Amino acid sequence: MPSEEFFAEIDRFDDFAGIAEPGNYRTAPDDWHVVIADIVDSTSAIAAGRYKDVNMIGAACINAVLNIGRRKTIPYVFGGDGATLMLPPGLVERATAVLLGVRDLAAHRFNLTLRVGIVPVARIHARSGARVAVGKYRLSRGNELAVFSGGGIEVAENWIKSGNDFVPERDPGDSIPDLSGLSCRWEPLASQNGVMLSVLMQARAADDVANATLYRRLIEDISAITDRAGIKVEPVRDANMKFRWPPRGLRAEIDATVGERNRALHALGLYVNSLVQWALDRFDITAGGYRGRHYRSELRDNTDYRRFDDTLRILIDCEPEQAQAIEELLEQQARRGDFRYGLHRSDSALMTCLVFNLDKGEHVHFVDGSDGGFTAAAKNMKAK
């Protein structure tokens, strides 16, 4: 199998619990590279109420790379205030340029500092004792997401944050990132059960097999708490999907996607486009591949609210009593030394969208708890 096709050729799994099955992973080739992108001091930006901008830049890192390569060959995980990706050898140079372009965009249009680090997989395998293991989770028809295990992603993140050895500093030149398909037009998703709970968990066992056992048991235990008759805990449902005009997130979309176009004309175009989308959604009209209520149904199926990249991240719309039970469960596990965890409670969630091909149902929607979500949960985990 050619190295460039590594991710495309991995067998997919359909049940998210498959993240806890070692057989679902393949070790990454040594000639691939791990990308870690994160916003420096994102907690301050979030404290200033800028969590939508933070999510937008995190998603932009993914979108910029997908728009220059074959989407089915590039593994990625959205992290809220950043992203994790892997690059095949033939894409490293171009991807570095567009990621540095996103870094400049974050600085100049959003006043955010984006750190981008790129680590060779060979270096991780040779010097850390960890490995970069990759799996493919089928989110929905036509939409497959990466999951990472083996400890290699955590190693790469620690190396990047501890120095500049893996942080490219060259001028991106004229590499304006293509962010077409990136949008954030839906209103905040109000909790239907009382609490939007952002949960981060890291198993701390001695090896991958033992960690997999811990994750499998934890997923089952959380499901036992949330699987009550009549209670749905998915954060995106028809009842909380609100589209108003003009969308509150449109300014961030304009700033991210304007490129070299005339800003006023680009903004006008997006205002008109979003008005058309509002009308199609409101009156269930089909036009140009957009099919009103059908899109809503696909969107719910295509929502990425569970992720794994050496850290398990889940957003749960639960009752206060369920949130308390989940926290007690995790605290019990933490006292035994099995897990590190962090939580954040909010009353709503935010959605950032990547739209590739409406006719084929190829669009992915990242959700994060409002008021910081997974970033705040990570801060809570570090405090513990």
Image (cartoon, rainbow, N blue to C red):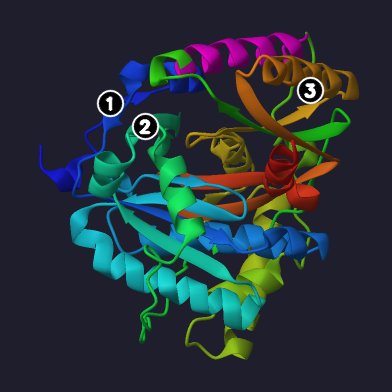
- Seen at 44% across and 53% down, the residue is 159
Q: Quote the CA–CA distance across marks 1 and 3.
A: 34 Å
Taking 270 as reference, is 32 left or right?
left
Query: Judging from the image, what secondary structure is the residue with disc 3 in?
Result: helix
Residue 151 seen in render: yes
Q: Which residue corresponds to mark 2?
A: 136
> Which residue in the rendered view is the most extreme toward the left?
1
Q: What label does residue 283 carry, if any?
A: none
**Mark closest to the chain's N terminus, 2 or 3:** 2
* Mark 2 in CB contact with mark 1 (< 8 angstroms): yes
Taking 306 as reference, is 186 left or right?
right
- Which amino acid type is marked by label 2? Lys
- Seen at 51% across and 57% down, the residue is 161
Disc nearest the viewer among 2 and 3: 3
Q: Main secondary structure of the magenta part?
A: helix
Q: Quote the CA–CA distance across marks 2 and 3.
A: 29 Å
- Which amino acid type is marked by label 1? Asp
Q: Which residue corresponds to mark 1?
A: 11
- Which amino acid type is marked by label 3? Glu
Residue segment shown in magenta: 211-228
Residue nearest the viewer, comparing 317 with 275 = 317
Residue 226 part of the magenta-drawn span: yes
Q: Which residue corresponds to mark 3?
A: 327
